[in-house]
Each structure stands twice: as structure tokens, then as C-alpha cells.
Image (spheres, rainbow, N blue to C red):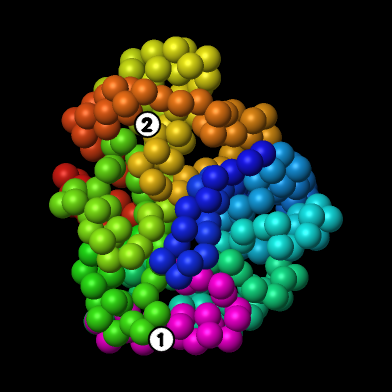
Amino acid sequence: MDIPLLELGDGNHIPVLAFGTGTAWFKEDGDTNFNQKLVDLIKRAIDKGFYHLDCAEMYGNEEEVGRAIKDSKIPREKFFITNKVSQGIHNIRAAIEESLKKMQIDHFDLYLIHTPYFAKSDAAFQSAWKSMEEIKKDGLATSIGVSNYLRPHVEATLAGATIPPVLNQIEFHPYLQRGNEYLPWLCENGLRVGSFNGLTPAFRAPNGPLREPLSRIAKAHNTTEAAVLIHWIIQNGVVAVTTTKDPQRLDEYAQALKIKLTKEELKEIKDVGLTYHFRASWPKHFEADDRS
């Protein structure tokens, strides 16, 4: 599978489609073989060409991801591996060293601060970012960025940065397109955008106003609603991170790279999506009608 690349602000390039290893959240009680199932699932994704793996300390499955990478026999240089720090935010160097050890690799292609909620002041953002700059300088991460940051968090980080973040991974989909021109502002300040929960209109809010348009557009292109949504995200210049516990969906997601929606179809998804609001992640940090 040939996945297009986007150039980051530091000159490195990121594949526009990633397999999210957050499938750890799908573990069911009593499933004693879950860890091996997870390894096998990630190996299936790799076998199908998903060499961009999106990981996180928070998922608690770094050892399984590492086993899948090793068992795949694919050379390390073919992978683009993103990881995110959360529990270890107050000692980022120790956190990344432990994550690299668990995953049996020597560097991450992209390393992100997972959430902004650790920081109680601008100084806290800047202190954490200094640690991120140091791990980049030392070669533990090729590129560095943030996740779930709002504009004030990014502004606080940029104010003390000598190496600016290259990407902000946020929840982004037609029902949460982010208000106040946030995505253009990020672009103007050198940050690419990554998306998670991109399939929300199809799976988490299936009865929203996009139900009919997505079904119609998918049928017109002989594909699925999920593939249409991923394509829409990528066409917005955003990196799409998606996951599944069903290996058969991997081929479905890959179709997003093959279809070509018309300008009218892309606009319809955008316009209809803006009539509805749904936030799947971190809702306790936002008012019900907050689209930031």
C-alpha cells in the first residue's frame, strides 16, 4: 500500500494514514489471550502496508506493539512510529527511554505530549517542551509535537520554544471541525494536524445528519462510509489515525486512498457536518456546545 506523505515543519515527512494501536481499549473481561490477539492484529496491519503506527504510553501495550514490529521482519526504516507521553510527563526522558525499551527500538519518528491537562501554568507547558526539545536533540525522537492542545496551550508552548512543535493530534471529523479557524491558525504557525476519532459520524453518532449523505456518497464510489470519512480527513490536509479490532476493516480503510470525492461531495460533508456537534473524547473539559 502506497501511503502519501505530508511534509512537517522540520523537513521530515509523515504518512497521511496511520493504524492506531489504541485497540487495547477494546479488551473484554476474561479475555486471557488478548495480548497475543493484539500482537496478531498489529502484525496484520503491518502486513497490509500500515507502516505508520500510532501508539501511546497511555494505551499500556507498548510491549505488544514492539513484538509485532519485531515479528514482522520489516526493516525499522520502513516504519513511521508515533508515540505519546502521558503518565511520564514529569520526567519525559525517563518515559521515552522506557517506551523505547518496551518497543525494542532506538527512536520514535514522532513523539507527542498526549494531553495538555498536566499543566497549570504557561511555565509548566514550557518546561515540558524543553524536555521534548532535549530528546529530539539527542536523537530519541526525530520530530516532536503535541496532542489535544487548544490554541492557548499551543501559544504558551510556542512562547518558550526554540524548536517548535510540528503537529497537533486532535479529535477532528465532520461533527467536530474545530471553531475559530483553529486549523488554519495551526497551519500558519507551522503545525500539521493529526486526527483521531475520525469515524465518529459513522460509528459514534450514526444517526446524525450525515447518515444519508455518507451512505449516498459511499454507494456512488462503491466503497464504505468509513473510507469516505478517512478520505475527507486526508483531503483536508490532516493525518488520519484510525483503528479497529476487526482485521477485515483494514482493507476498507485502505480504500480511502483509492477513491476520489468530488469538490461538491467534500463540501456537502463539511456543510452538513457543521450543522451538528458531537465530541467523543475528553468531554468533561468542554461545555456541551464548545466546538473549540
Residue behind mark 2: 201
| Percent coordinates x, y for residue 173 in the rendering | 35, 40
Earlier sequence position, callout 2 versus callout 1: 1
Judging from the image, what secondary structure is the residue with disc 1 in? helix
Left or right, residue 179 beside residue 189: left
151 or 26: which is nearer to us?
Answer: 151
Q: Is residue 127 magenta?
A: yes
Q: Quadrant of residue 108?
A: bottom right
**For the image shown, how many numbered marks are present on the structure?**
2
Residues shaded magenta = 122-145
Can you tell which of label 2 and label 1 is closer to the viewer?
1
Residue 196 numbered mark, or none: none
Residue displayed at 28% across by 66% down = 189
Mark 2 surroundings: few (<14), some (14-19) or many (≥20) residues within 10 A? many
Quadrant for the N terminus, please. top right
Residue displayed at 36% across by 23% down = 262
Above or below, 74 against 113 in this view is above
Residue displayed at 33% across by 82% down = 161
Residue behind mark 1: 130
Left or right, residue 202 beside residue 266: right
Task: Say what amino acid the circle numbered 1 marks.
Answer: Lys
Residue displayed at 67% across by 58% down = 79
31 or 140: which is nearer to us?
Answer: 140
